Image (cartoon, helix red, strand yellow):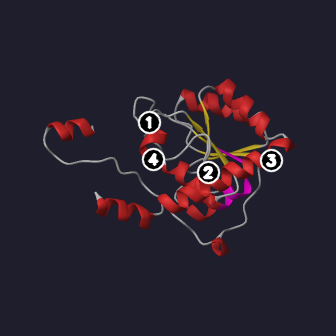
Amino acid sequence: ILRVYEDAGIPAAYWQIGFEDVPDELLPDMPKHDVVWLASMYNENRRNLNEVLKQFDYALYQPGDSTQTLYNFGKAKAIYRNAKIAISNNDYPEKSALVSNRLFQALAAGGCVVLQEHIEGLDEKLGIDSKEHYIEWSSLPELHETITTLLEPTYEGVRKETSAAGTAFIRENYSFDAQVAKLFEL
């Protein structure tokens, strides 16, 4: 879409959302799970992903469920922080670099390593690195294998290192203060 604006002589740039922060002292007690996914089950791809995740100590938090995590950023942060792995997927593969705010929420929370489904142009547009800040996956078998590996005790250091790098990057570059500063630069 940027090309459409450019062709019309309208200055435009890609500008991503930030994350909502909640002070740690306000976080509620939430359960701990190896793998968490905050998502809606509105299509077959997501239902298939859910079936793969059920093979682990896993919790699905959906809008409208009893935990009411949708837009309750304190609960979501506590859930992500208590997990070893958080899942993020891409429902719109044709959209370059399009991601949900949950990627930012999970990375900013700290504590979990985020496994993000491949999204064309994500690293380039966000400045994020799939080898340093999060771990990318491209298929359900690959995701299953990655989760299995990352849950092995010998990979705890990898999880923590990737989680810490992702958290630091997002907190520095995608707070709303940072995003507003980027907007003014544009």
Mark 3 residue element: helix
Does 80 lie within the magenta span? yes
**Residue at point 56% right, 51% down?**
64
- First in residue order: circle 1 vs circle 4: 1
Q: Residues within 10 Å of mark 3 (few under 14, many from 20)?
A: some
- First in residue order: circle 3 vs circle 4: 4
- First in residue order: circle 2 vs circle 4: 2
What's the magenta region?
78-86
Label 4, on which residue? 126
Label 3 to label 1, Cα distance in Å?
29 Å
Label 3 to label 4, Cα distance in Å?
26 Å
Mark 4: which amino acid? Leu
Label 1, on which residue? 121
- First in residue order: circle 2 vs circle 3: 2
- First in residue order: circle 3 vs circle 1: 1
Q: Nearer the viewer, residue 153 or 26?
A: 153
User: Where residue 55 appears, x then y in whole percent?
Assistant: 77, 33
User: Where residue 33 appears, x then y in whole percent?
Assistant: 76, 49
Label 3, on which residue? 156
Label 2, on which residue? 65
Mark 2: which amino acid? Asp
Residue 13: numbered disc: none
Give residue 171's quadrant in the image.
bottom right
